[in-house]
Image (spheres, rainbow, N blue to C red):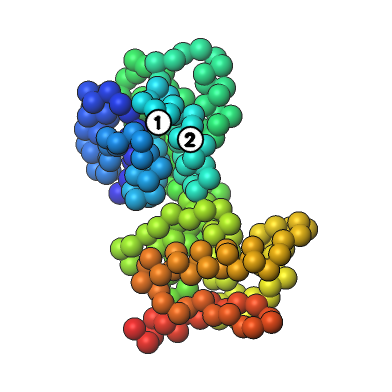
């Protein structure tokens, strides 16, 4: 079952979209607070977003850019704007497809299915990639981390850092390796790296993982999954 987030300020359209999605056996979540779209997205952790362009306060292009800072999940714009430049802006701001209103709901469902197959299903390159250790599962393409029935969204740098640590767990990962993964040849100071490590510790804590990320003074960091056996 997939989770679809609907960001549409017309209650009738939002309700009909939700009804059609649920008929296919998937979960549809309708946003009502259009000042907290990113917060709602993070809480829902959807597989795909249906995003209107004309929204209160900030338009869909703005919210698409905000979502793209934390996730690569498919975003399909739905809008009454039918000018070529509107579609160009949608794609350039991070959208994956664009549907103009009025639309047939079956076409919307076909577009949703197409995006889901492309990213998560049969058409995904080698299927969706995951990195897993002791039940902790990272979905790099979604920028999502899961443990049991809990899942959280990550930023791009958090995703890269956790993936690097998971792939080498329980081995030590040197500071140099982490710096190269996160910033290539760009110079950063020790404080910047420490801030990112602290953020990852907080993300792990959200899943109930306590002291898993160890600091090896002067050398680097280790993700020790022994916490699971001790729980």
Callout 2: helix, strand or loop?
A: helix
Callout 1: helix, strand or loop?
A: strand
Drawn side of residue 28 relative to residue 67, left or right: left
Residue shown at 37% from the left, 39% from the top: 37
Residue at the bottom extreme of this rendering: 230
Are circles 2 and 1 on residues that touch, CB within 8 Å? yes
Mark number displayed over residue 64: 2
Drawn side of residue 45 relative to residue 73, left or right: left
Front residue of 26 and 206: 206
Residue 20 against residue 133 in the figure, above or below:
above
Front residue of 177 and 22: 177
Mark number displayed over residue 51: 1
User: Would you identify the image quadrant in which residue 35 lies?
Assistant: top left
Query: Visible in this render: residue 118?
Result: no
Residue 154 placed where, x, y %? 48, 55
Residue 209 against residue 195 in the figure, above or below:
below
């Amino acid at each position: 079952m997939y989770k679809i987030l609907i960001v549409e300020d017309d209650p009738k359209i939002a309700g009909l979209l939700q009804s059609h999605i649920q008929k296919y056996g998937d979960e549809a979540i309708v946003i009502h607070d259009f000042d907290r779209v990113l917060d709602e997205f993070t809480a829902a952790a959807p597989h795909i977003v249906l995003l209107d362009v004309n929204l209160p306060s900030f338009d869909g292009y703005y919210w698409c850019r905000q979502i793209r800072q934390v996730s690569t999940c498919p975003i399909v714009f739905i809008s009454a704007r039918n000018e070529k430049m509107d579609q160009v802006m949608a794609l350039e701001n991070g959208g994956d497809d664009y549907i103009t209103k009025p639309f047939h709901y079956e076409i919307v469902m076909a577009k949703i299915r197409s995006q889901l197959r492309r990213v998560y299903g049969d058409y995904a390159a080698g299927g969706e990639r995951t990195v897993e250790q002791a039940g902790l599962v990272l979905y790099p393409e979604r920028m999502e981390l899961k443990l049991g029935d809990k899942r959280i969204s990550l930023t791009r740098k958090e995703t890269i850092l956790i993936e690097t640590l998971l792939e080498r767990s329980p081995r030590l990962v040197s500071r140099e390796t982490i710096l190269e993964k996160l910033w290539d040849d760009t110079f950063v100071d020790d404080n910047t790296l420490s801030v990112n490590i602290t953020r990852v510790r907080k993300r792990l804590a959200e899943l109930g993982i306590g002291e898993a990320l160890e600091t090896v003074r002067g050398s680097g960091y280790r993700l020790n999954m022994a916490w699971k056996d001790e729980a």
